[in-house]
Image (cartoon, rainbow, N blue to C red):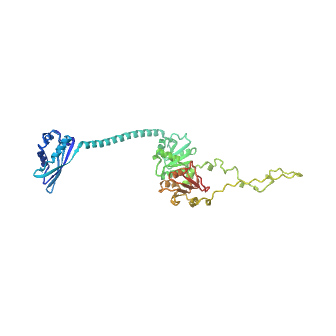
């Protein structure tokens, strides 16, 4: 015989109220005594308990101020009809001990439903745990293999044993980062021409490498990365500068972020002008600025204003191409050559007065921040809504709310600025001059100080 109520299918829950003080044995005795023979031999409560079809009767009584209230729980393994008959039979009990009492059935619960619900909830927990463990194993395996490949690919280079990729010697371009973790992250993205300086002092090996390759410095977007970059500017040949987003580190970037940062790298001269840093080392300038080719204004030898002797308006027979006259030559002298037509004057630049009033006001604002390395942000009504140093201009533009419509700054227009301007809905950009820009978005109008006219 089993009296375990958890083996039952249903549970009868009833409320009891008595006009006097009663105890649990009084309630159990009244239930057995007053239902005996009432429901027939098949539903005799004592026989049902002996056969295990009805579990132990649980009673909870609380007596206060001469009255008692409580609850009765009876587990049942009978079918629905028999359980309902047994429950209704409880309500016939009208006395408990010497007291008048009343029993009211509150509910008949199907225990199997609650068990099924518990099974479902527990199954969800078990399945979630299995999936998490399986996912973790897959990630661990993938990461382990990736790290193993990275460790195999990473090498040490030079006398300082600097962390580097395997393609340092073969590649024409070089990416210089801060530490070993940065090298590993670039290797994970398939970039193998990378080397780390491992500290704030630039090793001699990196200095030597920088002289024969196209060098991109890629530093973290924090204060430490800025200090390391300034050290490199003073000691290395640098062609381009790439920075991680503000507050981020190169080792934390995803592959998409790494590629974007390297794609938006800035030529060194443009970076120096935008950031306000100075280069006291051997940082390379563009080809024309280094004199590595004849520019439009370069001439062999001294210019015409440095020639000694008479100028072009002082005629001299030694410089005259006509043949000299012999004495006693009666032939008339040949006529002088016709004067050369003056070279056409270059077109005059458009003056601010010739521009529409709105554009003229923009250039007045640009003149007001000349040589200050400042940037101004104008709203839809052309009023200044914010300003920032040029080196913080792009970060400020990304976080500016509400967004500006015009940017005016004392610097050089870069591709990254135009991309961000297009993303943030900027309509007009006013600056000193254009930098190395590949594509100007159709929605962005760019004007420069050089010609006071629209570039796009």
Q: Is residue 353 above or below residue 323?
A: below
Q: Position of residue 407 (x, y in %)?
A: 53, 56
The answer to whether residue 277 shows anywhere in this view is no
Out of 268 and 107, give the one closest to the viewer. Answer: 107
Out of 274 and 448, give the one closest to the viewer. Answer: 448
Q: Is residue 272 left or right of residue 112?
A: right
Q: Is residue 207 left or right of residue 327?
A: left
Residue with the most extreme left position: 98
Q: Position of residue 102 (x, y in %)?
A: 15, 51
The answer to whether residue 128 shows anywhere in this view is yes
* Residue 133: quadrant of the picture: top left
Q: Position of residue 166 (x, y in %)?
A: 51, 39
Q: Position of residue 225 (x, y in %)?
A: 49, 51
Q: Is residue 333 left or right of residue 20?
A: right
In the rendered view of the protein, which quadrant contains the N terminus?
A: top left
Q: How many marks?
A: 0
Out of 232 and 415, give the one closest to the viewer. Answer: 415
Q: Is residue 66 above or below residue 29?
A: below
Residue appearing at x 71%, y 55% in the figure: 305
Residue appearing at x 44%, y 39% in the figure: 146
Out of 454 and 319, give the one closest to the viewer. Answer: 454
């Amino acid at each position: 015989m089993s009296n375990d109520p958890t083996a039952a299918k249903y549970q009868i829950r009833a409320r009891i109220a008595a006009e006097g003080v009663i105890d649990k044995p009084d309630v159990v005795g009244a239930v057995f005594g007053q239902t005996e023979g009432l429901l027939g031999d098949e539903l005799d409560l004592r026989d049902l308990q002996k056969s295990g079809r009805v579990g132990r009767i649980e009673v909870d009584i609380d007596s206060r101020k001469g009255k008692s209230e409580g609850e009765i729980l009876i587990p049942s393994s009978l079918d629905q009809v028999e359980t309902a008959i047994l429950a209704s039979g409880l309500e016939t009990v009208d006395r408990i001990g010497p007291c008048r009492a009343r029993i009211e059935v509150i509910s008949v619960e199907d225990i199997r439903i609650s068990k099924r619900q518990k099974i479902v909830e527990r199954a969800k927990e078990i399945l979630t745990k299995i999936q998490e463990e399986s996912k973790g194993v897959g990630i661990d395996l993938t990461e382990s293999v990736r790290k193993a490949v990275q460790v195999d690919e990473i090498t040490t280079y030079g006398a300082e044993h600097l962390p580097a990729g395997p393609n340092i010697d073969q590649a024409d371009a070089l990416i210089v980062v801060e530490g070993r973790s940065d090298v590993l992250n670039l290797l994970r993205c398939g970039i193998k021409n990378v080397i780390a300086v491992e500290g704030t002092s630039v090793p001699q090996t990196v200095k030597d490498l920088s002289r024969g390759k196209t060098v991109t410095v890629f530093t973290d977007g924090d204060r430490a990365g800025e200090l390391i970059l300034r050290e490199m500017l003073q000691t290395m040949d640098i062609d381009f500068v790439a920075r991680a987003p503000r507050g981020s580190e190169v080792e934390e970037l995803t592959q998409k972020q790494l590629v974007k940062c390297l794609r938006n790298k800035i030529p060194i001269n443009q970076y120096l002008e935008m950031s306000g840093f100075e280069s006291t080392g051997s940082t390379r300038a563009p080809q024309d600025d280094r004199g590595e080719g004849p520019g439009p204004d370069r001439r062999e030898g001294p210019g015409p204003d440095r020639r000694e002797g008479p100028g072009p308006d002082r005629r001299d027979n030694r410089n005259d191409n006509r043949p000299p006259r012999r004495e006693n030559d009666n032939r008339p002298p040949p006529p002088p050559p016709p004067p050369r037509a003056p070279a056409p004057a270059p077109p005059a630049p458009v003056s601010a007065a010739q521009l529409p009033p709105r554009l003229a006001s923009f250039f007045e604002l640009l003149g007001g921040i000349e040589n200050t390395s400042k940037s101004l942000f104008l709203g839809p009504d052309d009023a200044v809504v914010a300003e920032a140093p040029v080196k913080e201009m792009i970060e400020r533009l990304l976080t500016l709310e509400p967004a500006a419509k015009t940017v005016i700054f004392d610097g050089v227009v870069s591709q990254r600025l135009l991309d961000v301007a297009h993303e943030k809905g900027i309509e007009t950009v006013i600056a000193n001059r254009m930098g190395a820009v590949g594509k100007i978005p159709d929605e962005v109008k760019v004007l420069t100080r050089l010609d006071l006219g629209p570039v796009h």
